[in-house]
Image (spheres, coloured by chain):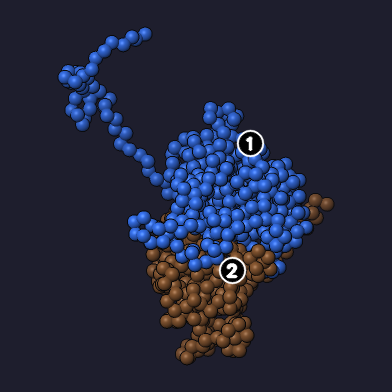
Amino acid sequence: MGNRRKVKFTLAEMMIYNASLEVRDHDRVMVGQGLPIAACTMAKKFHAPNAVLLTEAGLVDIDPYRSPLHIADPTCMKGFSYSCDLIDIFTTVLNRGYVDVCFLGVGQVDKFGNINSTVIGDYFNPKMRMMGAGGAPDFAAYAKRVVLTMRGGKFADKLDYFTTPGWLSGGDSRVKAGLPDSGPEILISTKAVFRFPPPEHELTLVSLHPHCKVEDVQKDIPWKLKIADKISVTPAPTAAAIDFCRTFDPTLSAGRKLGLTLSMQALARKIAEKQKQKS
Amino acid sequence: MVLEGVFMGDIPGSKVMTAKEAVEKFVPDGASVSIANFLTCVPFALIHEVIRQRKKDLTIWSQSGIEEIDLLIAAGCTKKVITAYNYRAGGEWASTEFERAVKDKRVEVEDLSNFTVLAMLWAGALGYNFMPVLKGIKETDVFRVRTLLGEDKFKVIKDPFTGEDTVVVKGVQPEVALFHCQRADRQGNAQYWGSIGNSKWAALACKRIIVCCEEIVDHDVIQWSPHLTLLPAFRVDAVVEDTWAAHPAEVLGYYNFDLSFRAGFYFAQASAKGMQDFIKEWIYDRADRQDYLSHYVSKLGAEKLLRLRARRHPSQTADYGTANLTVWDEKGNCEELGVSRTEFDKIIESQPEVCEWETEEK
């Protein structure tokens, strides 16, 4: 045992750290904007230096120097190894089996890790339009492993819109549908970590974040949650991981709304300053 | 790199015009329009011009909207959008015009995935009627739920070689592409580097292409770096030069994303009125991109903009050099054939199959 330590970290930092642990050295990783790119860049820095990070915009082997604002941001492009395009990524890379792991954010998720990222409510009379499918359906269908992260998302018995295949209806339903025998491995939420163990591939609680109880987790889940024989406490981020998060993407550590609010206030100050100069 | 004192429109074959002229000429009401950039290097100068000219009933083919779709909808330019993604800055608080328009039924949307929407344009660009896609999509509502494209969204056919079910999409060729890139020559050879995304296929699929660039360069520059040319001149109909044309998005090698300006936009568009105010201030009340920049500078200061300027990080050059060996050397001999040009003429003209007839020469 090392020294006891007391650290303060945000839930986002906790999630980023645990997501980063899912990247193995030499993995070819499909990253998305926000939490995934922070987690994967962290992994590359701390334990998977040979991981190859790629985005569907056609950037392969990126090493961003700060958090990109989206997956085609020039901050990804100061030194990358292969410049191709979106068609190349989905065909020559993904379809040929070269994506080892893919990171996806979750809007709505069901028992078998199927995802909705399109609408909340009825498709034709939605309560909310989310961002849409993006690359998720194709990546989740053909990547060898899928890591799901969920911050604002919800668990649902039935998805309002079936955007992205997880384990379909569990068991061997994916293989029967002609998809590779791979799918979501892990879901990291703001309260806990879940896995999808074979043969059922049903969402199963494996660890609780500090201060969370099984009841807190069950409360958000409309079915009787499956719980692993042994559940542990989710590892807290190391001091170095926390420092990395805040250096790389302070807005993510703070939460997007707080981050944008700070930016907005900076803009308002700039406008006021300029007006003062004029008068 | 443009020669000083040369009037750009004067060069033979020049397609240089202003954004205003290009949009007037090539974006008619009712056209299907492909936005040939993906998240980055967004052709905002052209999109703002489309809005300023109050174009109507456009069908928009978008890979991913970052705010351009919201603007086009709010300005009443489109009621039909085919896309894979439209950015929103957060949860319920961050309502977008896209969301409001779907709820109010002011816009019809066809939801595809990044690969399948581009596969339609890819097929169109290649001149194919259809294209196979990854069949996992069949398990999703992206496949099942259909709006604008209806039956034509996906079909399942038998692979003629294996007999397996294959999901295919239809090839499409929209009327006009709006594309922004780093540089182009006056004839329209358009060079783009960095994140290629959808650009090549989303542009080449279209019947017409409007290229907007940060700078026009001489044709020599293109010939020194043909690997950077994404679109050849013969496919391009108009070349527009506008600096900072992608602002508040970024252009690799030129400037970064303007995050705080964008944060302002996200909060503005969270209400319908905020969105209309934004369009009035930054599009309707501005004559062109230059005026937009002047307005920015007077409101926020030039320093804020200049802070976003990219620092130089040029690529390693590729060597296109050859030994420059011509067939006939300076003495008129051919090293490979071991004869002089005079000897060669004699040899071939003494062959039995040589032809001869009389021609009139002036």
Q: Which mark is residue A161?
A: 2
Q: How many C-alpha atoms fall within 10 Å of the one at disc 1: few (<14), some, or many (≥20)?
A: few
Residue at 30% over, 36% down:
B323
Q: Tell me which chain the residue with mark 1 is part of.
A: B
> Disc count in the image?
2
Residue at 19% over, 20% down:
B353
| Image colour assigned to chain A | brown
x and y, in percent, of residue B302 in the image = 69, 50
- Which residue was labeled with disc 1? B25
Tell me if residue B56 comes above or below residue A236 in the rendering.
above
Identify the secondary structure beneath mark 2. loop
x and y, in percent, of residue B310 in the image = 57, 52
Residue at 42% over, 59% down:
B166
- Identify residue type, mark 1: Lys
Residue at 70% over, 58% down:
B105
x and y, in percent, of residue B12 in the image = 53, 27
Identify the secondary structure beneath mark 1. helix
Q: Which mark is residue B286?
A: none
Chain shown in blue: B
